[in-house]
Image: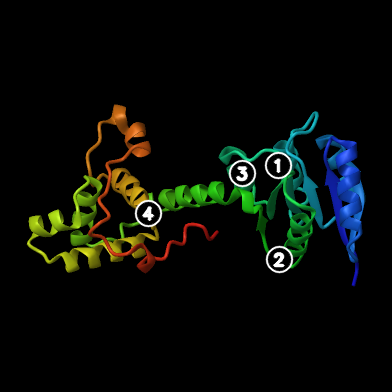
C-alpha cells in the first residue's frame, strides 16, 4: 500500500517536530512537508501533492482559515484536519462550514490524532470528543435554519399544540383547552419532536418563535431565543422515548 502523504502546517517548530514523530511511528503514514505559515503551505501543496493537511488556525501572514479557503480551489481533493487550541463555537462552526474532515484540539491525546488520521483516510470525519457540546449546538442551529426554509411538516393540530407548549403550557392545560385526553396531547408532542428532529423543548420553542407560532416583540426577539418560556415536562412523554439526532452530523 502506498504511504498516506501528509503536510503539517503550524508556526511552532517544536510542535511540528512532536507531531511528526507521533505520525511517522505509524506504518503507512508519511509527513512529506512542513509549513510554518499559510503562504508556505500554499507553495508546499503545489510541490508535494499530499492527501491530508494537518492545519493550525493561528499562523503568520495567512491565517489558517484564509489558507484553507485559498487551498480549496486548486486542491479540492486534499482533506483537512484542523489541529488547534481554539475551541469556541465560532471557530468550530467556520471550520465545519469550510467542509473540513476533522477538528482536534492541541490538548487531545496522540491516540486521538492517529485515530482521526486513520478515520479520515478511510473516508470518515473525526471531531474531538472535547467539542461534543459545540458540535451539538452547531447541528441544532443548522437544523433550525434548514427547517425555517422548508415547508412546515406539522399538521394544524400539531402546530396548535406546539404554540401552546411554546407559551409554557403543560400537557394537562393543553388537554383541557382543546378537550383532548392527556395521552393524545403527549402523542402529538412525540410526533412533533420526530417530525422536526428536535429533541429538546428549548429547540422546539425556538422553532415556534422563528415560524411565528407565538408572537414576540421584535426588540426582544434575540432575548426570547436565548431565554424562552419554560416548558413543564412533568406531563410529557419520557425523554427516553424520544431519540434526538442533533448530535449526528
- Which type of secondary structure does the marked residue at label 4 adopt? loop
Mark 1 surroundings within 10 Å by alpha-carbon count, few (fewer than 14), some (14 through 19), many (20 or more)? few
Between disc 2 and disc 1, the foreground one is: 2
- Distance between the Cα atoms at labels 2 and 4? 31 Å
- Distance between the Cα atoms at labels 1 and 3? 15 Å
- Distance between the Cα atoms at labels 2 and 1? 21 Å
Q: Earlier in the sequence, mark 3 or mark 2?
A: 3
Q: Nearer the viewer, residue 72 or 235?
A: 235
- Which type of secondary structure does the marked residue at label 2 adopt? loop
- Distance between the Cα atoms at labels 4 and 1? 35 Å
Q: Which residue is mark 4?
A: 200
Q: Which mark is residue 92?
A: 3
Residue drawn where x is 78% and y is 33% of the image: 59
| Contact, mark 2 vs mark 4 (Cβ under 8 Å) | no
Q: Earlier in the sequence, mark 4 or mark 3?
A: 3
Q: Which residue is mark 2?
A: 123
Q: Which residue is mark 1?
A: 69
Amino acid at each position: 500500500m502506498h504511504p498516506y502523504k501528509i503536510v503539517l502546517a503550524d508556526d511552532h517548530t517544536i510542535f511540528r517536530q512532536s507531531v511528526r514523530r507521533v505520525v511517522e511511528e505509524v506504518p503507512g503514514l508519511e509527513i512529506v512537508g512542513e509549513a510554518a505559515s499559510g503562504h508556505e503551505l500554499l507553495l508546499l501543496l503545489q510541490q508535494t501533492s499530499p492527501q491530508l493537511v494537518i492545519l493550525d488556525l493561528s499562523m503568520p501572514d495567512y491565517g489558517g482559515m484564509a489558507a484553507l479557503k485559498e487551498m480549496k480551489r486548486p486542491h479540492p481533493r486534499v482533506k483537512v484536519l484542523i489541529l488547534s487550541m481554539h475551541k469556541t463555537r465560532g471557530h468550530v462552526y467556520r471550520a465545519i462550514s469550510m467542509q473540513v474532515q476533522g477538528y482536534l484540539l492541541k490538548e487531545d491525546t496522540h491516540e486521538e490524532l492517529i485515530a482521526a488520521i486513520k478515520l479520515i483516510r478511510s473516508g470518515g470525519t473525526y471531531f474531538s470528543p472535547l467539542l461534543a457540546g459545540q458540535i451539538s449546538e452547531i447541528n441544532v442551529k443548522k437544523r433550525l435554519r434548514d427547517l425555517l426554509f422548508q415547508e412546515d411538516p406539522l399538521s394544524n393540530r400539531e402546530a396548535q399544540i406546539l404554540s401552546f407548549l411554546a407559551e409554557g403550557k403543560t400537557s394537562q392545560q393543553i388537554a383541557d383547552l382543546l378537550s383532548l385526553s392527556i395521552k393524545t396531547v403527549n402523542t402529538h408532542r412525540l410526533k412533533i419532536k420526530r417530525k422536526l428532529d428536535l429533541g429538546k423543548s428549548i429547540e422546539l420553542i425556538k422553532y415556534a418563535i422563528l415560524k411565528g407560532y407565538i408572537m414576540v416583540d421584535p426588540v426582544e426577539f434575540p432575548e426570547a431565543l436565548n431565554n424562552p418560556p419554560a416548558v413543564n415536562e412533568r406531563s410529557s412523554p419520557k425523554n427516553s422515548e424520544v431519540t434526538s439526532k442533533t448530535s449526528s452530523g
